[in-house]
Image: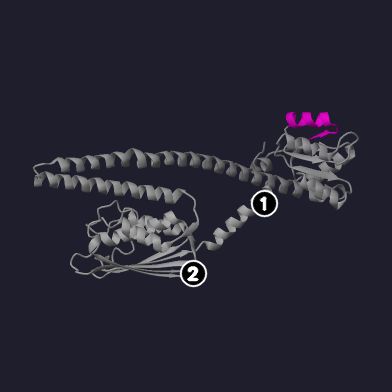
Amino acid sequence: MIKTITRLMEKELKILMLEDIQDDVGLIERALRKQGISFSSKRVDTREEFVDALDEFDPDVILSDHALPQFNSLEALNICRKQNLEVPFILVTGTVSEEFAVSCLKQGADDYVLKSNLVRLPSAIQNALKQRHHEHKRRKAEKALRKQNEELVKINKELDSFVYSVSHNLRAPLMSVLGLINLVQIENKKNDATMNGYFAMMQQSIHKLDDTLKEILDYSRNARSELNIEKVDFKRMVEDSFERMKYMDGSDTIEKSIFFDEQSVLYTDPYRLSVIINNLVSNAIKYKDPNKGHNIIHIESTVTDMMLSIVFRDNGIGISESYINKIFDMFFRATERSEGAGLGLYIVKETVEKLHGEISVKSVMGEGTVFTIDIPNLKVTHESLVNEKLAHSEQQM
């Protein structure tokens, strides 16, 4: 229960007073009227009367003396807390120790005012009402945020199901169709050139769709899964990427040169790093320059305690200056030779940023492209996590 500050300031305040001395009630009322506060009041001095008044009188403010013959302010405060009342509770009492006043505030009282200084009571009431109002708004916002978070958790679970569906229910049938096409080609005794052309187009379309599905999976996994920090053999990862791409059209005509400067052990997310390398290698092969007799992919990498730095260079067709600021946009295609969904470099940038790194690009049409990537070495983070797990295990023993 809480009422807005505007309503409370414009209308008459309902003040419940827990007080056993009528003369003190008169002094309190006089101090409030002197400051122009409009109010009605109800006095109670027993537990039963106090509990009944909370429900029947529905106060906007509670003013409580500390010591009554059979009841006290701390008991009254505890009743309010148990009922989850959002009504300002102000202690109005005689001389008390500073320790006692602090104790009351810690237990939920909004303020305390000495009866010898009632001139401060009106401002104490107004401040308490404002504070309760702000607290109510904060809790309301937190409740709305929790609800949104619950909805997001539900959406994420649904996305997990969708990703599984993409991975299994779509890709598996595609591979089955591709296998059937291969069988039909083998059984094509006449070796009909026209039919073989149709088969090749079908295979190309299937591979294109499968690549798009894999890009969607990579994007989803990067966006929603936590970092998995492990020791990474970067040299082996690059070699595996080239091995994986060796069946791509034109891969066998490209000269690969790699330089590794490993000054430290690398710790990062191996899956995400492989996504970056695979996409860049694949792009360099796709967009090699057919007019050049000598196509190259050159990778230089340096691993220090702080950073993995990668320079990825090719002499392919290059990127137009007018497109250079758009190549990391979702679904952007810089050339008609692009057969994918335009997600590759977008995923690369998103993945680099997920690893807390940076990526930049320089390119000249007809000359080639250079990607520069800096990714933090999470060696220290990994060691800290290991130490935390060890400490936790020791505490459990």
The vertical placement of 232 against 159, above or below, is: below
Report the front residue among 111 and 129: 111
Dot 2 alpha-carbon crowd within 10 angstroms: few under 14, some 14 to 19, many 20 or more = some
Q: CA distance from mark 2 to mark 1?
A: 32 Å
| Element at label 2 | loop
Q: Nearer the viewer, residue 35 or 211?
A: 211
Q: Is residue 226 magenta?
A: no
The picture places residue 211, in percent across and down from the top left corner, at 30, 49
Residue plotted at (74% across, 28% down): 56
Q: Residues within 10 Å of mark 1 (few under 14, many from 20)?
A: few
Instruction: Please indicate whether residue 9 sits to the left or right of residue 121 in the image.
Output: left
Residue 346 % position (x, y): 36, 56
Residue 34 can be seen, yes or no: no
Q: Which circle marks residue 53 in the picture? A: none
The residue located at (82%, 46%) in the rendering is 31
Q: Identify the residue at image location x=48%, y=38%.
A: 154
Query: What span is in magenta?
Result: 41-57
> The N terminus lies in which quarter of the figure?
top right
Query: Sequence order check: which comes first, mark 2 or mark 1?
Result: 2
Which dot marks residue 304? 2
Residue 179 vertical placement versus 366 (above, below): above
Image location (x, y in percent) of residue 312: 35, 67
Three-letter amino acid code at the position of disc 1: Glu
Q: Secondary structure at mark 1?
A: helix
Amino acid type, mark 2: Thr
Up-down: is 215 above or below 143? below
